[in-house]
Image (spheres, helix red, strand yellow):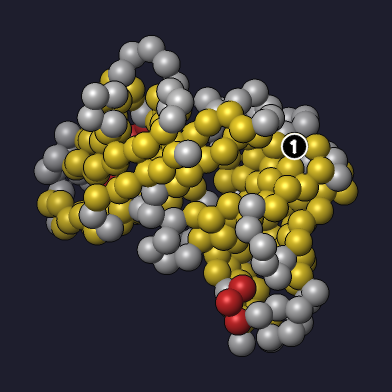
Amino acid sequence: AQSVTQLGSHVSVSEGALVLLRCNYSSSVPPYLFWYVQYPNQGLQLLLKYTTGATLVKGINGFEAEFKKSETSFHLTKPSAHMSDAAEYFCAVSSDSGGYQKVTFGTGTKLQVIP
Amino acid sequence: SQTIHQWPATLVQPVGSPLSLECTVEGTSNPNLYWYRQAAGRGLQLLFYSVGIGQISSEVPQNLSASRPQDRQFILSSKKLLLSDSGFYLCAWSTIGGGNQPQHFGDGTRLSIL
């Protein structure tokens, strides 16, 4: 069984401030972890992923996330928020399941950037 | 490069009417295909997935069905829509291989039932 918890359905930051979106996961097997971003009335776009290897992964638009096994966390960060970062962010955990990819998504965090 | 197309972008339907949403993928072969429904504040719920032509698996019992008549075509249908079928429907694809592959999403269909 696998699950994802995103703390905070809404997060507000000032433009130029640090962005921190929290994600904790539960998985019975070594997890594959993803962050996706969704802009209004659009589909989800991959920001970054962790599969194996380096625990600090870098993604698009200056975002990065660190896999911490001991804390079962995969928090998303960006040093300096930009207005264009306002969107909804989804953390996801994935596993192999009989030939297809079973993905469990968190409930999402809406990021507001205040000018 | 690979692309995924969903249509229509928006749809308003009366209760009891039929539904057909279509999704096609270009630039890849034999993808895994998925239909999700997204409700506000509830994340994404997997409705159906397909690992090949004619192979459909349902994750939750519901008023909807899915079909995959061609390798890169995935259709979501209903014979009679319910008010509870309103939502944002997303199609996605991934390469066959395993859980380490990301999913790639279409731009979705916003369905409103009156």
Per the image, label 1 sits on a secondary structure element best described as: strand
The image quarter containing residue A19 is top left
User: What chain does badge 1 belong to?
Assistant: B
Residue drawn at point x = 33 percent, y = 22 percent: A57
The image quarter containing residue A71 is top left
Q: Is residue B59 visible?
A: yes
Q: Quadrant of the N terminus of chain B?
A: top right
Q: Nearer the viewer, residue B3 or A48?
A: A48
Residue drawn at point x = 82 percent, y = 48 percent: B68
Q: Is residue B44 above or below residue A72?
A: below
Residue drawn at point x = 36 percent, y = 29 percent: A59
For disc 1, the neighbor class at 10 Å (few under 14, some 14 to 19, many from 20) is many
What is the x, y in percent for residue B24? 74, 47
- Hey, which residue is sitting farthest top in the picture? A53
Q: Quadrant of the C terminus of chain B?
A: bottom right
Q: Is residue A41 above or below residue A23?
A: below
What is the x, y in percent for residue B42? 42, 61
A23 lies left or right of B107: left
Total marks placed: 1
- Amino acid type for the residue under numbered disc 1: Val
Q: Is residue B52 above or below residue A38?
A: above
What is the x, y in percent for residue A52? 42, 16
Mark 1 lies on residue: B51
The image quarter containing residue A50 is top left
Residue drawn at point x = 17 percent, y = 56 percent: A12
Q: Nearer the viewer, residue A5 or A17?
A: A5
What is the x, y in percent for residue A54? 33, 14
A29 lies left or right of A9: right
